[in-house]
Image (cartoon, coloured by chain):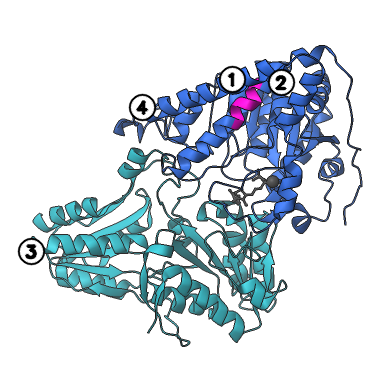
Chain colours: A blue, B cyan
Amino acid sequence: MASKRGGAKVRAERTPAGPDLASSVPWYRLMVLTRRFEDEAERAFRRGKIGGYLHLYSGQEAVAAGFLAAIRADDIFFTAYRDHAHAIFRGTPPQAVMAELFGKQTGVAKGKGGSMHLFDVPRGLYGGYGIVGAHIPLATGAAYALRYQGTDRICLCFLGDGAMNSGSFHEPVNMAAVWGQDGMCPIVYIVENNKYAMGTSVDRSTVVTHLASKFGLHGIENEQVDGQDFLTVRRAAERIVARVRATGRPYAIEAITYRLVGHGAADLFQPYRNKGEVEEWKQRDPIQILERELHRAGVLDDAQVAAIHKEAEEKVAAAIKYAEESPEPPPEELPRDVSAQG
Amino acid sequence: MPELRYVDALTKAHHEEMARDERVVVLGEDVGRKGGVFGVTMGLYEKFGEERVIDSPLAESSIAGVAIGMAANGLLPIAEFQFADFIHPAFNQIVSEAARMRYRSNGGYGCPVVFRAPYGGSHGTALYHSQSIEALYAHVPGMKVVTPSTPYDVKGLLKSAVRDPDPVLFLEHKRMYRLVRGEVPEEDYTVPIGPAVVRREGTDLSVFAFGWMLHEALQAAEVVARDGISVEVVDLRTLKPLDKETILKSVAKTNRALIIYEDNRFVGFGAEIAAIIAEEAFDSLDAPVMRLAGPDVPGIPFSKPLEEWFFISQEKIAQAMRRLAAY
Ligand SMILES: Cc1ncc(C[n+]2csc(CCOP(=O)(O)OP(=O)(O)O)c2C)c(N)n1
Ligand SMILES: [Mg+2]
């Protein structure tokens, strides 16, 4: 049974056509691009071009897009291993992300990391993290450092519903709340609640299924948001980011979302969830929802939609080609960067 | 006798131990309904129910911790970690609590728990799904560390681990699950924790290996045999307690020792074997003890060529064997 203790209601911040509609068209374009990117990455995985593990963000795009649309270029963010979209939304060139998936020298981590371990230092992406929950304390400390250095920059920390069950969630969140009393922890925790941690559903791993409310127990203000609706996420994000920047106090949001694909590319049969559920969520595809809104507001027409899709296809095809043709890292890369002295 | 894959022999061992003794419980992330990420716990949930096969939330430190509590209070838990890389949050529980329970309570409480984890590199497993962790735990008094390399041994050693009165870290190199096959008796048998075994007799040099490296070493021994080099290959099977006797006996026979492990070279498990040979078999050595191990970089990189440079292949092993034989 779900407890509602401490949790805020899902907020609706829908205003009809407003100034942010036109400025959301580029985000629609980016969401189409990343969806195409994920589809093609999966195909490359099936062709044996991408090895190891591959976790796709398809279906959850509005969450990262909404928040990354709301921060400044000098803000920073941390995320887990489902991280391709986060990088691309932030402006990392898709070909550099694809090259990393292919393990090439031109990848964002020079092929050392692969899909789960992206980095983009100039754009403030402090990494995708393969150990679930490990990044939550790091993001919290990074937020403290931003204030300590006297800046008004903030930090976003994306995390999964599954990560919230580990100690590496509860410990730093408690610290953040304590530091926030002195305005020393400008961080937004963004829970991407896609209902599952691998094969385990949220209600099988916690009694308090209102995940936002768990932050309340630590003294952090929180709310839920419809994670399928970009405009709603973005408006919430703008409000929250402004407030965290002004106060230096942490804030948390639980975005209710769904991954339309398997946990990873190897999760073909998904016995832990039924087809009907997936079909239902396909009706709430964030890209279609945004497309309809922009259409209705008159800032996007059919010709533009077609052009955006075509452009996405071309960009991703170019990214694949770039990744395929890029060189493998040379042997000297193996021991490089173990320490500052080499 | 049926031929089984390594993974199936392990699954069988779980089924048999759970049927044999009601005190045995299994817990970990997705061990129940899903049957584990590598399918090791397949069918247990259906047969033994959710009280004995516990799907835990994502919480490694507490998976270890609650298993220790269960063990101290009469149960025989098998805690699965999806990958050895994820066990680090549980380091404190395993090292500070499981390994010390008996000593601190003056023998009053034991801790008969098994911590199982797939370890080691496979293609594309990269930085956080490929680590070798044996040295970290073999260092700790009170811990036993087991690394079976055949289907027969994995079944027999899991049974011994479950029945052992003390904590056992049970490490399974993930490449073996589906690649290694072998005969496995239907009946109940155990393989004792401790003894190593000579897998291949030889006279020119001794190789000490475990897990996947054992298989690579056996292949390499076959290759260099064509050049007339006779290699003895010893499967350590248990790293702690370590079977010094078998190691020293082999060195006394061949006078040359090559130790192979996939973990980073520096302070790796092979360093201990090298020290034991240097201390106790110095007089029988015709060449320096040699180690072949992973490079000292933090994790196996993702890219294919970098990974190849990291991995200890048959070719690298054969080359090391030739070098040592020629010394
Ligand atoms: C510490 C740790 N434990 C287990 C895993 C294996 N694992 C990878 S993803 C995952 C589920 C995480 O679920 P969630 O946080 O909800 O993220 P999602 O996959 O839904 O995006 C698990 C158990 C891991 N990578 N790290
Ligand atoms: Mg999830």
Q: Quadrant of the C terminus of chain B?
A: bottom left
In this figure, which residue is indicated by the disc labeled 4?
A325
Q: CB at mark 4 closer than 8 A to ligand 1?
A: no
Label 4 element class: helix
* Chain letter for the residue marked with disc 3 in the picture: B
Residue depicted at x 55% and y 31%: A37
Say what amino acid the circle numbered 2 marks: Ala
Distance between the alpha carbons at the discs numbered 4 and 2: 32 Å
* Chain letter for the residue marked with disc 2 in the picture: A
Residue depicted at x 32% and y 59%: B213
Q: CB at mark 1 closer than 8 A to ligand 1?
A: no
Q: Residues within 10 Å of mark 2 (few under 14, many from 20)?
A: many
Q: Which mark is residue A69?
A: 2
In this figure, which residue is indicated by the disc labeled 1?
A91
Are discs 2 and 1 less than 8 Å apart at CB? no
Q: Residues within 10 Å of mark 3 (few under 14, many from 20)?
A: few
Say what amino acid the circle numbered 3 marks: Gly
Residue B276 location, x and y as percent? 30, 64
Disc nearest the viewer among 4 and 2: 4
Q: Which residues are magenta?
A: A29-35
Say what amino acid the circle numbered 1 marks: Gly
Distance between the alpha carbons at the discs numbered 3 and 2: 68 Å
Q: Quadrant of the N terminus of chain B?
A: bottom left
Are labels 4 and 2 assigned to the same chain?
yes
In this figure, which residue is indicated by the disc labeled 3?
B228
Disc nearest the viewer among 4 and 1: 4
